[in-house]
Image (cartoon, coloured by chain):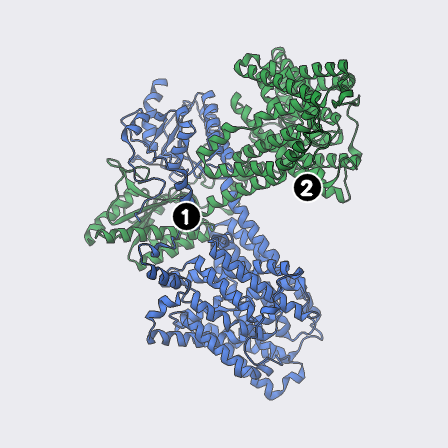
Chain colours: A blue, B green
Amino acid sequence: MSGRAHPEVGDEELSPADISSRQQTSCVHKVGVPPKQNLFNEFMYTFKETFFHDDPLRHFKDQSVSKKLMLGVQSVFPVFEWGRNYNLKMFRGDLIAGLTIASLCIPQDIGYAKLAGLDPKYGLYSSFVPPLIYACMGSSKDIAIGPVAVVSLLLGTLLRTEIDPNTNPNEYLRLAFTSTFFAGVTQAALGFFRLGFLIDFLSHAAVVGFMGGAAITIALQQLKGFLGIKKFTKKTDIVSVLHSVISSAHHGWNWQTILISASFLIFLLISKFIGKKNKKLFWIPAIAPLVSVIISTFFVYITRADKKGVQIVKHLDKGLNPSSLRLIYFSGEYLLKGFRIGVVSGMVALTEAVAIGRTFAAMKGYQIDGNKEMVALGAMNVIGSMTSCYVSTGSFSRSAVNFMAGCQTAVSNIIMSIVVLLTLLFLTPLFKYTPNAILAAIIINAVIPLIDVNAAVLIFKIDKLDFFACMGAFFGVIFVSVEIGLLIAVGISFAKILLQVTRPRTAILGKIPNTSVYRNINQYPEATRVPGILTIRVDSAIYFSNSNYVRERIQRWLTDEEEMLKAQILPRIQFLIIEMSPVTDIDTSGIHALEDLYKSLQKRDIELVLANPGPLVIDKLHVSHFADMLGYDKIFLTVAEAVDSCCPRLYDEV
Amino acid sequence: MSGRAHPEVGDEELSPADISSRQQTSCVHKVGVPPKQNLFNEFMYTFKETFFHDDPLRHFKDQSVSKKLMLGVQSVFPVFEWGRNYNLKMFRGDLIAGLTIASLCIPQDIGYAKLAGLDPKYGLYSSFVPPLIYACMGSSKDIAIGPVAVVSLLLGTLLRTEIDPNTNPNEYLRLAFTSTFFAGVTQAALGFFRLGFLIDFLSHAAVVGFMGGAAITIALQQLKGFLGIKKFTKKTDIVSVLHSVISSAHHGWNWQTILISASFLIFLLISKFIGKKNKKLFWIPAIAPLVSVIISTFFVYITRADKKGVQIVKHLDKGLNPSSLRLIYFSGEYLLKGFRIGVVSGMVALTEAVAIGRTFAAMKGYQIDGNKEMVALGAMNVIGSMTSCYVSTGSFSRSAVNFMAGCQTAVSNIIMSIVVLLTLLFLTPLFKYTPNAILAAIIINAVIPLIDVNAAVLIFKIDKLDFFACMGAFFGVIFVSVEIGLLIAVGISFAKILLQVTRPRTAILGKIPNTSVYRNINQYPEATRVPGILTIRVDSAIYFSNSNYVRERIQRWLTDEEEMLKAQILPRIQFLIIEMSPVTDIDTSGIHALEDLYKSLQKRDIELVLANPGPLVIDKLHVSHFADMLGYDKIFLTVAEAVDSCCPRLYDEV
């Protein structure tokens, strides 16, 4: 493919006669009019740029059928691509990374499953099957797959609004698998239909706020295990939780539990601090949770602290994931509910996984295909829902550890999966005396990095409206619920888009001394304006959503200017030059707005002049006959040429 | 007010030392960094541009309190402003125009009320009170107020989905007034809270399609009266209506009715043709409907054709609008339904009125204030709902007649209102023998111009996606219902906005010979590219909704280019210049995308260079430290300067 800007401009040459006939003043440069394209090509171009901008089939061009088939298999299962160059050195990296993330994931999984309102074993199940599927289908080398805190909390909250897990544990479990199934279907469908860009509508700022709020909510939920409280509120908002904590302070707290959780939390935080100070010691915070679990379990077993009110895991089923295909609701009232919950949690899980994938790909300098990634994540959750797993995705904390431990490929996920398999087969009885307090401490320690104060400060500095979205999501989550926080985040993100398209910026331009360059006079205070000429730049495509605003705003610039000139007894404005460079497109409403502007300027005896309309714009000005109405001699390549052509006529009149 | 571009740039001068310290290369021009503004000013600027971009309080500045009070009254009731300069000559114009539109509105009102499922008298009521209110509060000089076909049809359709007018006429009427009340409240609220831009989201193209579809639906509905069919479907879609018409062809049609309606429709069409041929004879089509009503009524009265199956109006109450305040549902289940119907019909009515207001204001060269206009329309409908009127708005056809008849001010509406008053007081008995057939003919004749084929053709030529929205709305209305058509129109309009913000255009730039101007190489095939340098222009603000796309698209341009260069054994790309002129703003996600791009280019040994970032962008690049990371010596005022600085280093390496 050649590096052409718009395929609507084909190979046929533009006839110079065609241009010059339209262009009266011969001394200035011509504004190019791209040759017309037929409807089909135009449509195909827009379609391609919208859904296939990354040209996913480029590798298939000019290949034999067998080669195409192989490329097809490789594109669905990238393992066949990177697997062929896999070697022992890579395996060493993957083995260390896999063991490290396995030690991190096992205690986390048990805690996260509780957050989702499920038995601990489902957390381990979800760290066994999905990572295997992902390793075959995913394109990220660094992501660590499994249950994550935020999605577990969100899924748990959404499920609990439908079914109470204490009274109907079976229905609850079935709805969880149904939601997981539809989360996977949603993810795969978004990828397959190349609608991955939909997740971009959840802005970075909104995600930062949402994650921070969810982290605090999760940490607050852990106070139950941390303090050993038995009666705890089912709500997740900060007011209910703190009320629940404080009201149980007198007789509900268990000092033995607090002793265990507090001391191990301090241990975890210190190990994290050590890992931060010296990057080579990254493995200390990575294995600290498992070490804590082992020590605390041993301690409880020895002291029989469980008899003194320290709550323990008690029972963890031995054995591999049972099939759960028949547990999924494919009909009935829960089908729709499962679908709704699945779509929401699937989208949030996707946002997290894609963000992680992109971050680490940029660090290592490789590309990941967002849409292919979504298909992989979707397939993994669909299969997961049939093998007793709940929604899995990429974990921020474990992926970072994976990266630092030197993972080379997705094989580290396979190693982790094997360790989880061995745990499920042989080690689950050992977790019997593990105190819930240690799980609470591990989760609190794990979610702290999600509260990204630096990112929030940067957002505040860069964009105030972004910060507003961030804080809206944050406070929505902690004061109301994860659902409301998410809604606020999406709502503000959309409002920002609408603001962007309805209120584009405009600027007055001036000439930068000793150049022929015209720039915003506020950015360049040294830029000077030509008396009698007002140059305005419109900073957006002119569409129905902003055409009236643009017209009214230009008229207001003009009115303001004329009032000022009148006050200073200066010559009046005779020419209005609109710099159209940023106006990438225009629609029918935009043309009408220009016509209205032209008519009202005629009434005020001001000439309208356009500078540098782009290919789409000049084409549409031509088709709509506005260019004829205005005159092709009023359309220039640059502002400088437009000003040069206005000036002589200007002095004649003054 | 001075003509400054962005108030965030205050009066303080930018220190030259500040700039030059950031700028390493002294021979090129500096990229201006606007001074920082405090948060409050920044917020106020955005708020003002969003909601008060027309600076509605500008006249109040530097005025005494009494003057401010007077200006305040004048701004709510513009009648006090233009009324002071009103003279006899203007009155002559208004009198003729008022009488003309009155003769047009009386038969239309009777027909439109039936379209809304109401008694004919409510149509006349709605042409009495609302025009009077509008004349005091409105700012358009040309709009003719009253019931209109499309809104009547929409209101009727929406009301009928809730209540059957035949079985529960009282509840139906009460819901109609409730909806009118909330339509008015919606309109006034949109204006008062300066949210008028929301109606801009219904694009011109969608309105053209919706109006055309509604016109055909209305004309089809008239076949009942036109053919004298007694049993007629209650659905509005074309399939149901034609089925109803054809199945009643054998014994349901009434030849006397058809004779009347067909002959008068021909008369109306001929008179319209005459009016079009000779603009001075505009009054012929304007009074033709009333003449038809008089002649046909007289004819039926003489021949007693009503005994032969010709349906007649039968009874029209004498007397003025009764109060309907107590009929409005302010509680109960119909409150919410009335609210919903009111919001939809109020928005559609607003779209029509504002479009008319703007069109005629542009023709005569005056400004109308959209938000003030909405308050006036809202107040008129609120008061109307309390005086037995249903939703009124500006009528396209009558406003055009008003304009051609030489109206000068809103006094023509007062004249029309007085004529309707006299009709209600004295003339209603005369309508007893008016055949329904003639009303059908008048409505068919009135809605034909709403099918704007030329506009649709122009839309097709200018923008294919707009045409798709237009056709979607059109077919949605005629094959399903007005509601669905409206939904499709709004849906496609929104999809277009999302497309615009997620898939901005990018272009490769080349140097136009003998200039220092760089332009899109597809629009200007003569533009040449500098070997070793790739210049890409990004045509939009870089926000979260498109940041990933922009980064990936730039990387694809680069990959395409490198593949091509490799194939031709040409020197590789060493510099990537991004022309940022159209990039008016950037958010946190955009900065992250640039950082990711920078990192991946570093891996490929390509230098990233920026040209002409705008004031907001350079500020954010600075705040986020991306500018430090990139180096201030890589940011240039123009592409030409960027290329000049790259070239020497380029040849060193080659």
Q: Position of residue A479 (x, y in %)?
A: 63, 59
Residue nearest the observer in this picture, A515 or A633: A633
> Foreground residue, A412 or B198?
A412
> In this rendering, is residue A19 above or below A277?
above
- Asked if both marks, 1 and 2, belong to the same chain, the answer given is no
Q: Which residue, given by chain and number where applicable, does mark 2 sit on?
A: B340
Residue named by callout 1: A48
**What amino acid type should be assigned to the residue bearing mark 1?**
Lys
Residue A67 in view: yes
Task: Confirm or deny contact between disc 1 and disc 2 (CB under 8 A).
Answer: no
Q: Nearer the viewer, mark 1 or mark 2?
A: 1
Secondary structure category for the residue under label 1:
helix
Tell me what residue is drawn at x 30 percent, y 28 percent.
Answer: A18
Chain of the residue under the numbered disc 2 shown in the image: B
Report x, y in % for residue B381. Answer: 69, 31
User: How many numbered badges does the structure rendering display?
Assistant: 2
| Residue furthest out toward the bottom | A302
The chain under label 1 reads: A
Whole-number angstrom distance, CA of label 1 to CA of label 2: 39 Å
Q: Mark 2 belongs to which amino acid? A: Arg
| B274 vs B303, nearest the viewer | B303
Expressed as whole percent of the image width and height from the top left, the position of residue B492 reads: 53, 42
Q: Residue at x 59, y 88 (%)?
A: A302
